[in-house]
Amino acid sequence: MPVVYWKELSDHFSSFRFMILLALIMLPGILAVYIAGQAIQQAVQSNPTEHVFLQLLTTESLFFSLATFLGFFGPLVGITLGFDSISGEYGRGTLSRVLSQPIYRDSLINGKFLAGLTTLAILWVSILLVVIGLGINLIGFFPNAEELWRMLFFAIIGIAYTGFWLALAMLLSMLLQRTVTAALAAIAIWLFLGIFIGVLASFVAGLIVPNPGTAEEAARLATIETVLGRMSPSLLYSESVRLLLNPVARSLVPILPEQVGQLEGLLVTPLNLGQSLRLIWPMFLTLVALVAVCFGIAYIKFMRTEIRA
């Protein structure tokens, strides 16, 4: 497996397709951080606040924040790394030749998946280092320990999120065995889960709670939309990031007007890192479980598939 792992890792970083996609994601993200950093620099000089470096990831500039931008376009990197991992070699007839060597099947697919996951991890860590470097240059001081830990867990969540799309793309590559078909199917699922699932959740919630007239009905409508929307990994990622990078955030459940007075003192008190992690733990485990399920199905399918072209 180490031989396959290092070969695949080398292929990823020497691929023009991956490097072009990486540039298309990194350049707008760096520009957004730079514009957000300039705005935060002016705000800090007039009114110093805590968790300044976290605002580099969440402040909207160019109509999006860096966390939102990575949540929408990050899956493209995972899809790019996985959609032709099996079908490409199958179509070229190289898969049977590779497995004719003393290489086990499980070593091949495990090496490919771990190489893709390592590439995604390097991408997220590189983005964090760029954010920290720009932040130090623009703001003029270093992030504290809690900010660094929150940014590290943000990268871990991002790796699990894009790892799901890598595993899904490998599964489609295994099932469809045609590179173009696997790519189109993965992009279609990405668009549906990233955009249209919200519209579908709003429609279904509107059927269950039509014309909400009270605050309780409005809260129930919003809760149903959230529960249905959590079928999408994109919403799991965005909710986790929102709770992690905003220490003041306590819950994504709608708060009724009569509850505001009871929680008024708590809503402005930031949570520590452990409390924020307890809030996002179920969503993170769901992302990890989705990765395991997709890769597990792809693994079983690959171990039982005829590999001769």
Image (cartoon, rainbow, N blue to C red):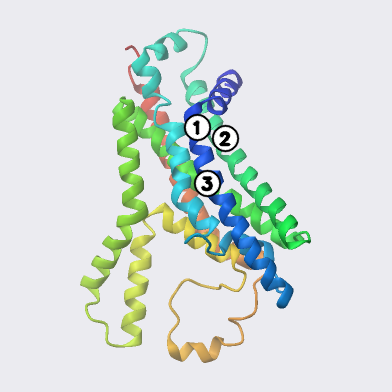
Q: Name the residue rendered at 59%, 49% in the picture.
A: 156
- The picture places residue 170, in percent across and down from the top left corner, at 41, 32
Q: Are marks 1 and 2 in contact (CB under 8 Å)?
A: yes
**Above or below — where is 132 with respect to 218?**
above
Q: Name the residue rendered at 50%, 34% in the picture.
A: 20
Residue 18 marker: 1
Residue 160 marker: 3
- Helix or strand or loop: what does disc 3 sit on? helix
Q: Rate crowding at label 2 as few (under 14), some (14 to 19) or many (20 or more) other CA atoms within 10 Å.
A: many
**Above or below — where is 276 with respect to 127?**
below
Q: Which amino acid does the dot numbered 2 rest on?
A: Thr
- The picture places residue 236, in percent across and down from the top left corner, at 45, 57
Q: Quadrant of residue 278?
A: bottom right
In the drawing, does residue 201 fall left or right of residue 292? left
- The picture places residue 152, in percent across and down from the top left corner, at 65, 52
Answer yes or no: is residue 59 visible. Answer: yes
- Identify the mark nearer the N-term, 3 or 1: 1
Q: Are marks 2 and 3 in contact (CB under 8 Å)?
A: no
- Mark 3 vs mark 1: in front: 1
